[in-house]
Image (cartoon, grey):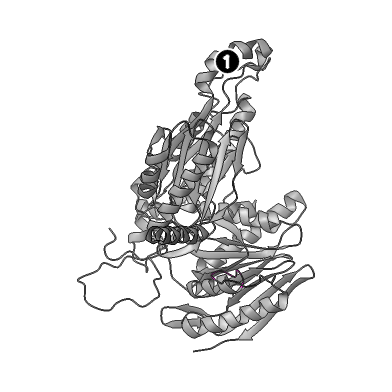
Amino acid sequence: MALQDICNFQDIFVDSSTTECPSALLGKKTGCNYVSALPFQNSTSLFNFRIPLAEYLDESPTQFGQISTSQDHSTALLQESTISCFPLPLSPPPAASSQAVPLPFPMSHGTTTLAFAFQGGVLAAADTRSSCSGLVACPASQKILPIHSHLVSTTSGTSADCALWKRILSRELRLYQLRHRRQLSTGGAAKLLSHMLHPFKGTKLCVAATLCGWDGGEVDGGHGTGGAQADLGGCMKTCGPRLFYVCSDGTRLQGTLFSVGSGSPYAYSILDQGVKWGLTVDEATSIAREAVYRATHRDAYSGNNVDIYHITSTGWTRRNREDLKEEYYREKERKERKMRLDMA
Amino acid sequence: DFTGQENFGDNGKMKDYHYTGPVEHRFSPYAFNGGTVLAVAGEDFAIVASDTRLSEGYSIHSRDSPKCYKLTDTTVIGCSGFHGDCLTLTKIIDARLKMYKHSNNKTMTSGAIAAMLSTILYSRRFFPYYVYNIIGGLDEEGKGAVYSFDPVGSYQRDTYKAGGSASAMLQPLLDNQIGFKNMEGVQHVPLTKDKAVQLVKDVFISAAERDVYTGDALRICIITKEGINEQTLPLRKD
C-alpha cells in the first residue's frame, strides 16, 4: 500500500507474535520452550531504525545520489540498512561500526536521580531539570516514569532515549504478563531492558536507569491457598523491595542504594551519611529530598523541582512535586535565625 | 573522520574567522533554515504562531514560508529547523493521519498525534530529523494543549513553549508573562484569548529585533472549537 510504504510500515497491523508455548491448562507455570517463545522474535517492531551507511557521507555533494558505473559502488550508495528493534543478529549491527552522522544540535543530558531500599519499601527521587548544552530545555520534566503498578524507573541520560525505551519496556512487560500469567520480577525486567539495549552498545544511545520495584514473590495459582501458605518460607527471599541499575553500556547491578547523573556525587554524600535499613518513611523522604536539594544547589545541570515516589507492596505513590526554590529561602532564614540566636 | 569543531549550535550562524589550521569539511546532510515557532494553550483555545522567513547562512530564500501546518481541525503543528526535514516530516504525519482515519474511522486527537510523532522522530534516532516541533491544539475535553518536542522525540505537554532560532530569547519572556515565574506578590490571572494574541504579537516583534533569522511576517493560527482562524502581521524585513 502506497501510504504505508512511505511511512516504511511493512506489517504494522499483522500481529504475528503468537507464541508456540501451549497455554497453561491449569494456570500452572508450564515449561515454555523459551527459545521459540522469545517475546520479541516475531513481534512487529515499532521501530525500524534507519542507520545511514557512512559511505554516502564521504561522497562529494555533486555525486551525491547519482548512480555511478561501477556495480558494487552503486549498490553501496543505494543501500541503507534498517535495523529492527529486537534483532537476533548474526552479524553485529552496522550501527556500532558505521560513523554517526554529525548532529547539528545537542541532546538533553544532565540530572540527579537517586533510589534506595529500606524497610518501608523503595524510595525514588529525582530533580526535574532537562538541560540541553547550556539551555534549560524543560524546567518541569518527569524523570521518574512508572512502568506498572509495582515498578517505577528513574531515568538519566538522553531524555528521548529514556522515554522511548521505558515505553518499550512497559509494552514488553505487559506482553510477558499476558503470555506467562505472572508479573515479571524487577530483576527480570532489568535483564530484559539490558538485553534490549545491548545491540545498541557503541552507538550514541545513552540510558542509565534504576528500576525500583516490589516483587510480590511466586504465587502458584494452581495449588490454591494451601500452596500459598507453604510458600511463605520461600517467599521471604523473593518478596520485597528490589533495586536494579541498568545502563546502556551493558551494566546491570542489584543494590540497595543508587544515585545516577551529573549531580550524583553530591547526592551520594548525603545518602551515605543517613540511609539505613531501619528508616521510617518520613525520615527516608526527608533524606531523599535533602540529597536532591544539595545536588541541585551545587550541580548546574540539576535544579527546579523534586519528585519523590514511594513503592510498597501495595504499589507506588507519588508525593506532590515540590519547588526547591522555596527550600533554599527557608534554609537561608533558618541560618539567619541561628546566627541571631548565637550572637544574642 | 570528522576533524574540527563539533557542530553544536547552527551551521548557518557566524563562526569565528581566524586561522586554526587546515580543517576538513565534511558534507553535512543538514542545513539550518532559521525561523521561530511559538505555541500557547489557554482554557478553551490554543495559539500556534511562527515567523515566515526562510533563510540559509547570510541569504533569505523566502519571505513567505510559514512554519505552521494544519493537521486536523483541532491541531496545528509548528516545525522549525531544517526545511527539508520539516517538509518530509509533515508529509509523513499527513499520511499517517489518513491511515488512522481509514482504519479507525475517527480523526486523531492532539494527544495521539503527539505520541505518534514521538515514535516517528525516534525511529530516526541515528539520523535524526533536524526539526524542532511544537504541536498546539485542543484536547478531547476542549481545553488548549501544547506539546513540545526535541529533535529525537522526547516530548511533554506544556502550557506554552517557544522553539526555533529565537527560542532562548522568547521562552524566558513567556515564563514571566504567562507562567508568572520569578515574580513575587502577583495575582495569577488566567490568560484570555485576546491577551494571548496580543502577547504573541509583542513577543515576535521583540524577537525580530534581536534575532537575524526571525522576521518578515508573523502567521498566527488561533484554534478554538469553532475552527482555526489565521492572521498575518508584518514584521521587520531587515
Q: Main secondary structure of the magenta part?
A: loop
- Tell me where residue A202 appears, x and y as whole percent: 35, 45
Amino acid found under the numbered disc labelled 1: Leu
Residue B238, placed above or below residue A269 = below
Q: Where, by quadrant of the figure, is residue B230 drawn?
A: bottom right
Is residue B183 in the magenta section?
A: no
Q: Looking at the image, which is closer to me, B188 or A101? A: B188
Q: Residue at x 52, y 72 (%)?
A: B172
- Crowd class of label 1 (few under 14; some 14 to 19; many from 20; radius 10 Å): some
- Tell me where residue A82 appears, x and y as whole percent: 47, 47
Q: Looking at the image, which is closer to me, A165 or A305? A: A305
Q: Which residues are magenta?
A: B178-182
- Relative placement, left or right, of B223 versus B93 is right
Residue B233, placed above or below residue B38 = below
Q: Please state the chain letter of the residue tagged with numbered disc 1 in the rendered image.
A: A
- Relative placement, left or right, of A337 versus B107 is left
Q: Residue at x 55, y 25 (%)?
A: A37
Q: Is residue A110 visible?
A: no
- Tell me where residue B39 appears, x and y as whole percent: 62, 70
Residue at mark 1: A232
Is residue B181 in the magenta section?
A: yes
